[in-house]
């Protein structure tokens, strides 16, 4: 056993993190190297002197298969949930809130089964268009960016509630694509004690561009409107918002990690009406993915010619077409209790809470930046 300990002890924290991820060890992102080493060793079976990871009770392809049939007689055939007789798609699991691998595991090797389910259409979508099968396929793609490209380091996942509505409010950046929204959602799906979906609201352009808008909805995205946000919170889901809006997304590099004004506090008003806690989220990494050289009002005018509804005054100009492989840090901060639901939120309280959320995020950003040695 000492040989195994010595061997694992030579690995880096990222190597141990990869082993912990493969073993399904929860809370791994918050562990130190020593804690990861102890957790991995606890997961190994060393009783027979031949260390190996404990095997699952049965291989996925040998597991019982769901017998649910459509009206046309098509059989589902997905692996059933442990202790049940139906798969996750056809059980009482709320897949519009929970993130559970539909094929029993995560990986591109499951796509044939998932594509078959897409073709059969033997399951429901929610009123906002979330398709659990399509969302899982997008999750597999996103995980490459999350784990291997941006190497996201996550803390504070214990603050994410296991059930019920909550508002996740984060600082915003990206310049080209909303990477921060995607990485925040992936962090909750991969690292939270109870993996859940974050229903992030997006601006007009994400809901207007052909193909993009189609898959944005299928992946669980929503329109930045009061109606969509109220539906998400009213049904007990997690709502992801970026109160800086376009001002944060398109800010110049000189203003990196300086949170802009949080609008009129609309996200606080929504949270108070639903009685949902607000969880501030500090994201470091998104500002350097596409460093912004300057912003252009003329470019914004051209965008408005094509998309008249798009609320943008300036557009960012950046030089790198591909995102830089910056290391990311996402910190979920302690929730802010807004009290019981009310139909008439106090306006002054809304503004005060909005500024409190902004202040907490800025403090966390400054703290992370101070200990960061390099953007990579």
Image (tube, rainbow, N blue to C red):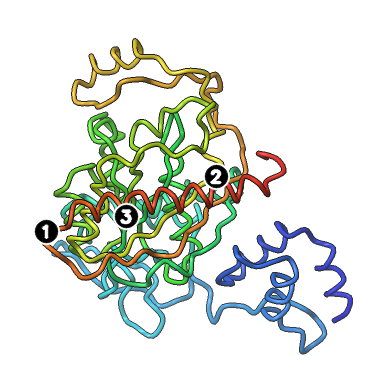
Crowd around label 2: few <14 · some 14–19 · many ≥20 (10 Å): many
- Asked whether 354 or 73 is in front, the reply is 354
Crowd around label 1: few <14 · some 14–19 · many ≥20 (10 Å): few
Q: Earlier in the sequence, mark 2 or mark 3?
A: 2
Q: Is residue 106 left or right of residue 275?
A: right
Residue mark closest to the camera, 1 vs 2: 1
Q: Is residue 213 left or right of residue 230?
A: right
User: Which residue does the numbered mark 3 point to in the structure image?
Assistant: 353
- Asked whether 288 or 188 is in front, the reply is 288
Residue drawn at x 79%, y 88% as measured from the top left: 48
| Quarter of the figure with the N terminus | bottom right
Count of number-bearing discs: 3
User: Which residue does the numbered mark 2 point to in the structure image?
Assistant: 284
Instruction: Give the SS element for disc 3.
Output: helix
- Residue sticking out furthest to the top: 298
Q: Is residue 197 left or right of residue 14?
A: left
Instruction: Give the SS element for disc 2.
Output: strand
- Residue sticking out furthest to the left: 343
Q: Position of residue 159 (x, y in %)?
A: 44, 67
Q: Position of residue 332 (x, y in %)?
A: 47, 59
Residue drawn at x 34%, y 32% as measured from the top left: 246
- Which label number is shown at residue 344? 1
Image quadrant assignment for residue 41? bottom right
- Asked whether 94 or 304 is in front, the reply is 304
Q: Earlier in the sequence, mark 1 or mark 2?
A: 2
Residue drawn at x 41%, y 28% as measured from the top left: 250
Alpha-carbon span between mark 3 and mark 1: 15 Å
Classify 281 as above or below 102.
Answer: above
CB of mark 1 within 8 Å of CB of mark 2? no
| Quarter of the figure with the C terminus | top right
């Amino acid at each position: 056993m000492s040989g195994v300990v010595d061997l694992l002890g030579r690995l880096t924290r990222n190597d141990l993190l990869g082993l912990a991820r493969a073993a399904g060890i929860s809370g791994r992102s918050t562990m130190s190297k020593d804690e990861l080493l102890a957790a991995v060793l606890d997961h190994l079976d060393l009783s027979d002197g031949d260390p190996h990871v404990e095997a699952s009770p049965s291989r996925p392809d040998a597991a019982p298969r769901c017998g649910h049939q459509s009206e046309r007689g098509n059989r589902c055939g997905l692996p059933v949930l442990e202790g049940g007789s139906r798969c996750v798609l056809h059980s009482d699991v709320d897949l519009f809130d929970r993130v559970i691998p539909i094929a029993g595991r995560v990986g591109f090797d499951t796509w044939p089964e998932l594509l078959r389910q897409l073709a059969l259409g033997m399951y429901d979508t929610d009123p906002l268009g979330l398709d659990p099968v399509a969302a899982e396929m997008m999750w597999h793609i996103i995980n490459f960016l999350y784990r291997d490209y941006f190497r996201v380091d996550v803390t504070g996942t214990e603050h994410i509630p296991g059930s019920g509505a909550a508002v996740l409010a984060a600082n915003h950046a990206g310049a080209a694509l909303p990477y921060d929204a995607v990485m925040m959602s992936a962090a909750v799906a991969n690292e939270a004690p109870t993996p859940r979906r974050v229903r992030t609201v997006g601006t007009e352009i994400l809901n207007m561009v052909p193909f993009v808008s189609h898959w944005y909805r299928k992946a669980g995205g929503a329109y930045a409107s009061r109606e969509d946000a109220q539906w998400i919170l009213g049904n007990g889901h997690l709502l992801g918002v970026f109160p800086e809006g376009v001002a944060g997304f398109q800010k110049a590099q000189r203003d990196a990690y300086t949170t802009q004004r949080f609008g009129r506090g609309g996200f606080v008003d929504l949270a108070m009406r639903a009685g949902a806690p607000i969880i501030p989220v500090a994201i470091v990494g998104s500002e350097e993915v596409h460093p912004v050289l300057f912003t252009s009002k003329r470019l914004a005018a051209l965008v408005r010619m094509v998309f008249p509804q798009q609320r943008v005054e300036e557009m960012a100009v950046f030089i790198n077409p591909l995102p830089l492989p910056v290391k990311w840090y996402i910190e979920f901060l302690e929730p802010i209790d807004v009290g019981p639901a009310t139909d008439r939120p106090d306006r002054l309280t809304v503004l005060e809470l909005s500024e409190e959320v902004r202040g907490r995020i800025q403090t966390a950003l400054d703290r992370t930046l101070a200990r960061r040695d390099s953007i990579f």
